[in-house]
């Protein structure tokens, strides 16, 4: 069974971050939100493992609960 990887795992993380920021440059909040939603769905589809996705949901939401 796979486990969600939360340790740094992206080669050239600075380049990745720069590319992500450039994707949003000059866009409205609504456009950026739409891009983020599309990106989430594309990457979730690529991962394809429901257990990993559920673990990611739990991990992402745990700091957001009041």
Image: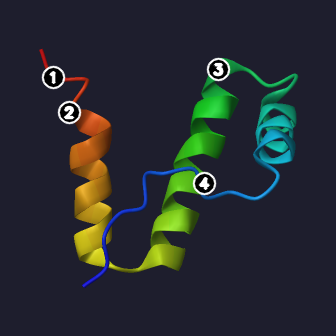
The quarter holding residue 34 reads: top right
Q: Earlier in the sequence, mark 3 or mark 4?
A: 3
Residue underneath mark 4: 39
Task: Measuring from the top left, give residue 11's x and y in whole percent.
Answer: 76, 59
- Mark 4 nearby-residue class (10 Å; few <14, some 14–19, many ≥20): few
Residue underneath mark 1: 65
The span from disc 3 to disc 4 (Cα, nearest Å) is: 15 Å
Q: Is residue 49 above or below residue 35?
A: below
Q: Nearer the viewer, mark 2 or mark 3?
A: 2
Task: Measuring from the top left, give residue 59's x and y in whole percent.
Answer: 27, 44
Tag 2 near tag 3, CB within 8 Å: no
Mark 3 lies on a secondary structure that is: helix
**Closest to the observer, 29 or 53:** 53
**Closest to the observer, 44 or 26:** 44
Tag 1 near tag 2, CB within 8 Å: yes
Q: Quadrant of the N terminus?
A: bottom left
Q: Nearer the viewer, mark 4 or mark 1?
A: 1
Q: Nearer the viewer, mark 4 or mark 2?
A: 2
The span from disc 2 to disc 3 (Cα, nearest Å) is: 24 Å
Mark 2 lies on a secondary structure that is: loop
Residue at the farthest top position: 66
Residue underneath mark 2: 62
């Amino acid at each position: 069974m796979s486990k969600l990887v939360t340790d740094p795992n992206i080669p050239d993380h600075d380049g990745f971050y720069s590319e992500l920021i450039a994707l949003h440059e000059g866009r409205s909040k609504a456009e950026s939100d739409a891009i983020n939603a599309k990106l989430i769905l594309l990457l979730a589809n690529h991962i394809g493992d429901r257990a990993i996705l559920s673990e990611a949901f739990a991990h992402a939401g745990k700091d957001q609960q009041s």
